[in-house]
Structure formats: structure tokens, C-alpha cells
Amino acid sequence: MKLEIAKDIYWTGYIDWDLRNFHGYSTPDGSTYNAYLLVDEKPTLIDTVKHYGFEEMVRRIRQVMDPAGIRYIISNHTEMDHSGTIDRLLELCPQAEVVCSPKGAEGLQRHFKKNWKFKVVTTGDTLNIGRRTLQFVLMPMVHWPDSMATYLAADAILFPNDAFGQHIASSERFADEVGLDVVMQAAAKYYANIVMPYGSQVNAVLDVVSKLAVKTICPSHGLMWRRAEDISRIATSYRAWASHQTEPRAVIIYDTMWHSTELIARTLYAGLEDAGIPVSLFSLQASHLSDAITEVMRSRVVLLGSPVLNNNVLPTMAGFLTYMKGLKPRNRFGLTFGSYGWATAGFKELENAVTESGMKLLGPGTYVQYIPSAEDLARVRGLVPLIQQAMTRKE
Ligand code: FEO
């Protein structure tokens, strides 16, 4: 069944029900790669899909028109989940031009090694496709250098590619059909894992986009946003995430060998809970790092714990620290803890990761030899007032 989202505009994407890992980010709910077909005098496809979704995308296009008639393929972003089938599609519509940013043209040539008919555009450029005219806004580093948005003023629709997206596979196409809280949580996880390092670039894009009349946002993953209140909520959240605003809450992320670090983590957890501070607890043996980092995004204080293994932290924690340093959750406070046998050098990794992520250490780490004693645990409990003060302290 063809899905017309506005007059002569069709969703022709691929629903990836089975996706469980998106380059290291856990996707328990799958995802979609959204392509949008604009039927006009010069039919135009905005983005394509991942390589294995080609047949499904073409089936959806054929429900509307013969793909041979497509005149423009807009590549808002080179990454292969959106541009991975341009080459195969061009075999069906060889006269089509590929519309992309300057960096997009470079990236597509590096990926496909083909000299297609490129129409290179930049911010403010327009493309008339018949009754309607498209406008382009470059979005460098949201989240690749080539990223751009396409805007359709006639229908007040923004096609911002990865921005405002979520990894959710569903038979519904709009956020309000699924439930806003569910979609917002997925959007937060998406932002935390993909977009978080690029806050200043996101704010710059929001400044441009906020001047456009937008009635529908059609991202390249997940659900579309069409209700004014939903658009306002996702735009407000993007502004807050991009500005590294946090909630007065803590997250404890740890791994453990012989349960000593776990005992410290759980003592902190109980102390914070007793003090009325919202807190969440992630064992990296049980939780995926992409879920832990999503909680870091909203938390004012990040508590990291590991035992020492061969002068290092545990490999699960080392992996998380690498991930966190790359995603740079600035403007937060960090505190470290752990258990050791005879050497404490490994704890330096925890402390360095806090500062290298752009967070401030709230105080010295709390490290306990072998098994925590009652006095050690009292010392751990004694950290709660420090954490409590950080909830209102300016970074
Ligand atoms: Fe969904 Fe950056 O690709």
C-alpha cells in the first residue's frame, strides 16, 4: 500500500525489523531507512536506503511511479545507510542527477568511484522540480561533514536526514501513532550515541531551522513528527541536548570482578536513593554501553567504577571509557571508585576519562583494597553530600 504523507509525497523507505546493532549501538527495536518520493514534473527521491533494503524501496517506488522517471536523487548524507543504493537506483533511472553538498560529492565519489551527474548545492540554493521548489541547508558535522537538510517550503516539510531520527522499526510512520514518550526515549538514545559530540553545530542548525515554517519533520530514521506539540518537544530537547543541559540526577556505571566494586556501587546507589537523588545503575556486564551513555546524557553526575586488572580497568569499562571520551558529554561532574589488590595505577584511566570527556572531577576517587570494610562503606556513603551539592553547583 502506498503511503502518501502529503499531497504527492510518498514514504518509500525500508523497515529494518531485524537490526540489533548499528555500528556498535544496540538497536533492540530495529530501525528504518526513510526515503521520500516527491512526484512532480521532475520526480525527486530524497535519500535512499541501506544496501539490503533496495528491493523493498523499489517496490514502494513502483507503487507510485516507474522509477525510470526519477530526475533527481537527493543525497542528504553520504553514510551508506542512506546513500548505499544510489548506484543500483541509477541503473533504473540513468538520467537522474545526484543532488548533494560539496562534501557529499567528494564522499560519494570516494565510496562508489563513479562520476555520476552531480548537482552540488549549498545553503540557500534552491532546486525547482515543477510545482515545487526545494531549498537546502548544509549541516556540517550533524553528524558528518557532508550532512545537509532539504526543505520544502510549499508543504512546510523539513527533511533533516539523521537529525531528529530514532532507531525504531514499526508499522506506524508518525511519532504520534507510536506514543511520544517511546519515540522521545529512542530519539534521546540516538542523539546520545550519534550526535552528542556536535552540540555547537546542532545549535547552529537549530538557529537556521527555527526561522523556517515547519509543519512536518521527516528524518531518515524512525518516525516522522507532524503535530506542532511534538515538533516543539523534539526541537526543545535537541536544544537542551546540544547545550549539554542535564537533570539533577546521577548515573552509576561499573563492572566488577569479585563483587567489591559492585558493593561500592550499590552502597552509593542506596545512599543517593536515601538522599532523594534520582539515580540509575548500570553494570556493564548486563547493560549495553549505548544505553549507559544515554543515561549519561541526562545526568548531572557520572559515577564510574572498576576494579584493577593487570594495571588497567576491566575491558568492559575500558570500552565504555573510549566510547564516552569520543562522545564528549561535557558540563557534567564525574567521580570514580573501585577495588584493587596491590596496585592502583589502573584508576588513573577512570579519572583521565572523566576529564578527557570534558567533565570535571568532583573530588578524589574512592578506592578500596580487596573487600570493603564497614569503615570503607561509611566513607563511600560519605560521598553522598558531595554529589548532592553538585546537583545545584555550576560546572
Ligand atoms: Fe543514518 Fe549517519 O547515517
Image (spheres, rainbow, N blue to C red):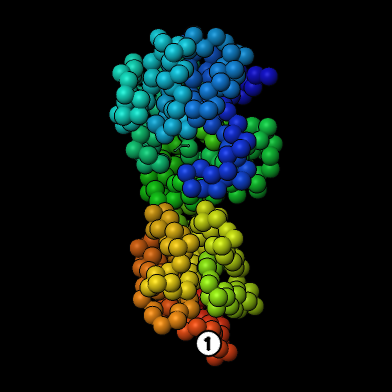
**The furthest residue to the front:** 310
Question: In the rendered view of the protein, which quadrant contains the N terminus?
Answer: top right
Mark 1 closeness class: few <14, some 14–19, many ≥20 residues within 10 Å:
some
Amino acid marked by disc 1? Asp
Residue nearest the viewer, comparing 91 with 248: 91
The residue under the point 38% across, 80% down is 343
Residue 235 appearing in the image: no
Residue nearest the viewer, comparing 224 with 285: 285
- Measuring from the top left, give residue 361's x and y in whole percent: 40, 72
- Measuring from the top left, give residue 252's x and y in whole percent: 54, 68
Q: How many marks?
A: 1
The residue under the point 61% across, 46% down is 28
Residue 145 appearing in the image: yes
- In the figure, is residue 109 to the left or right of 395? left
Against 251, residue 232 (above or below) is above
Q: Quadrant of residue 9?
A: top right
The residue under the point 55% across, 48% down is 26
Q: In the structure shown, which secondary structural element does the residue marked by tag 1 occupy?
A: helix
- In the figure, is residue 169 to the left or right of 346? right
Per the image, the residue denoted by label 1 is 376
Against 89, residue 322 (above or below) is below
- Measuring from the top left, give residue 349's x and y in whole percent: 37, 69
- Measuring from the top left, give residue 286's x and y in whole percent: 59, 60
The residue under the point 64% across, 32% down is 173
Mark 1 sits near ligand 1, with its Cβ under 8 Å away: no
Against 168, residue 2 (above or below) is above
Residue nearest the viewer, comparing 357 with 176: 357
Question: In the rendered view of the protein, which quadrant contains the C terminus?
Answer: bottom left
Q: Quadrant of residue 221?
A: top right
